[in-house]
Image (cartoon, grey):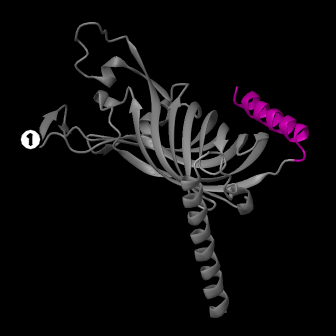
Amino acid sequence: MKKYFLIGLFVIFATLTNVVKAQTFLGEAFVGYNLSQVSGDHWGIMEYHRSGVQAGVGVIHPVWKKDKFSIDLSLEVLFNMKGSYQGKKYHDGSVVDSTVITGEYDLRLNYGEVPLMIYFSDKNLASVGIGVSYGRLTYIRLKEQGIDITNLKKDEFNKDEFNILADVKIRVWKRLKLGFRYSYSLTPIRTIPYSEYNPNYAGEGHSSNEMIKQRNDLFTLRLTYVFNERLEDLQPDPYQYKGDNPKFHNKAVERQRRKLERKQAREERRKNRQ
């Protein structure tokens, strides 16, 4: 399944490249801060306490343009840190079967990830995107009650992961954008008995044979820098008055005049410093 997914990504991207040869490929780099949890994690923690890093590079390819608006295809390669975390919850140090019960849970999962996104963009302001991604698990660390049990449990985790993504990014300065991304696993990362999910499994509606599918659930705050974007394309259109009230027209013209004078003054100071 992984092989066919990657082949599909390549075919889609190659096809669009041939269809829109005249368009420009833009390179981009990302760095982000993750807050994640695992749905169905140990004892139902279900809170975004696991922090991590997201970093990578990508290419953007415009597939349709009209005035300031465009539809863009993006292919990325990311390093992504996910997982779940709960600090010490019980401080009385109760002992069950020679294990001190603290409530601690620490799951760290690192992935190499390839997202394919489609963005609907206002070039001067914002982009909204949706997409899918394939991830390959590269690192596992699992602790329960403060005890490292990675070697006992690592074979339970699926190496391959498929996700659905939603993304919003806003231009904050020239080629720099601030974004917010949400990601959720389409396929389970691990399947465990309900008795592991909640040791008190005798509650109503559950049996010891019931299985829980765990999935990554992730929010990311991202900074994106686009390398070769033409800054002249980002300039606002010249002012054009379309009303019938000279008073408002004169005020708008005056604002434009002052703005131009400030720009000329900055350029003059820059030349004098050289």
Residue 137 placement (x, y as % from top left): 57, 40
Which residue is drawn at the image coordinates 54% and 55% (left, top)?
247
Which residue is drawn at the image coordinates 22% and 11% (left, top)?
203
Does the magenta segment cover residue 5?
yes
Left or right of residue 253, residue 51 in this image: left
Which residue is drawn at the image coordinates 57% and 65% (left, top)?
254
> In this picture, which residue range is highlighted in magenta?
1-22
Q: In the current view of this chain or complex, which residue is farthest to the top?
A: 205
Does the magenta segment cover residue 92?
no
On the image, which quarter does residue 148 sit in? top left
- Compared to residue 256, the image places residue 214 above or below, namely above
Which residue is drawn at the image coordinates 89% and 37% (left, top)?
19
Q: Nearer the viewer, residue 260 or 39?
A: 260
Q: Nearer the viewer, residue 121 or 8?
A: 121
Q: How many marks?
A: 1
Residue 59 placement (x, y as % from top left): 73, 50
Please give the residue where the numbered disc 1 appears in the rendered image.
Answer: 92
- Compared to residue 197, the image places residue 36 above or below, namely below
Residue 109 placement (x, y as % from top left): 48, 42
Q: Amino acid at mark 1?
A: Asp
Left or right of residue 209, residue 101 in this image: left
Residue 140 visible in the picture = no
